[in-house]
Amino acid sequence: MEVTKRILYDVEKSASRIDEILDASNSNYADKTSIPSRDSLTYINGYYVNVTALFIDIVGSSDMTSEHKRPTLAKMYRAFISECTAIMNSSEHCKEININGDCVWGVFETQFKSDIDTVFAIAAQLNSLIKILNYKLKKKGYSEISVGIGIDYGRALMVKAGYSGSGLNDVIWMGDVVNSACHIANKAGRDYRDPIMVSSCLYGNLNEENQKFFKTTWIDYTTYYQCNVINLAMEAWYTENCK
């Protein structure tokens, strides 16, 4: 959050704001069938909604600091984040995109099962993007990267958080679906696993054709599904242009 307005801190007003937030009625948190507009959020309400969360992060990013100087790392991260964001943003189902370090994640509105197949197609695009990016990185003499992509479907709580009156605020997504997708992304692409992994719930909502791309894997007694699917149009572009 960029600081846009400086306000002198007042402990009395601070205490009042805390009380207002903590005393808010639990009935202010309503169930919704679709993701509401950000404008409908206040500092005392929130919305429960079923969404699909997709995370993509770079495997072993901490090791990259010993291989490249900071300006080079900055360019590598910028290229990665820029185009992951471009792919997610191209989908009408994508309602939120967040960037945390070397991780890009999106919240997708998936009211129908077919919408979940659309998010899976976005994962395939992201996977193909990394192949193109690595070609560009190699040409510059930079290290190639690998990624983990995690997807889950479930119920999330959408709330507005920040400092009332300051212009400093953001939408926060809370719930197991977000935490789970992040956790899955951190497991994908590591220890000989495929770069795309999904939860059992997400897998169960895919159509039969998409389910055929996956194989089962077990991590800490939990069942996940993994694959290495690509986007055919992007693969054709790579074959034609990345020689």
Image (cartoon, rainbow, N blue to C red):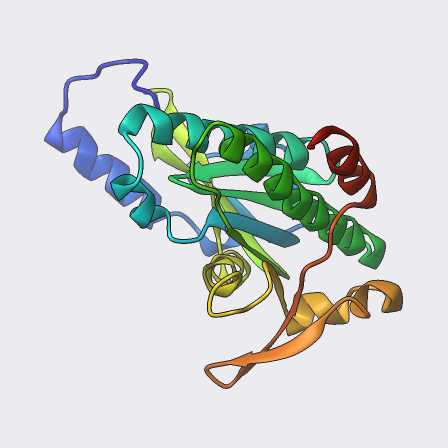
The residue lying at 46 percent from left, 63 percent from top is 183
Percent x, y of residue 239? 77, 38
Q: Is residue 197 left or right of residue 163?
A: right
Percent x, y of residue 102? 42, 41
Quadrant in the picture for residue 210: bottom right
The residue lying at 60 percent from left, 45 percent from top is 107
Q: Is residue 91 above or below residue 215?
A: above
Nearer-the-camera pick, 177 or 148? 148
Quadrant in the picture for residue 217: bottom right
The residue lying at 67 percent from left, 39 percent from top is 94
Q: Is residue 13 left or right of residue 221?
A: left
Percent x, y of residue 95? 64, 37
**Would you say residue 111 is visible in this rendering?**
no
**Would you say residue 131 is visible in this rendering?**
yes
The residue lying at 65 percent from left, 48 percent from top is 127
Tell me how many marks there are: 0
Furthest toward the top, the residue is 5
Furthest toward the front, the residue is 243
Furthest toward the left, the residue is 11
Percent x, y of residue 101? 38, 39
Q: Is residue 214 above or below residue 103?
A: below
Q: Is residue 216 left or right of residue 173?
A: right
Nearer-the-camera pick, 1 or 58? 58
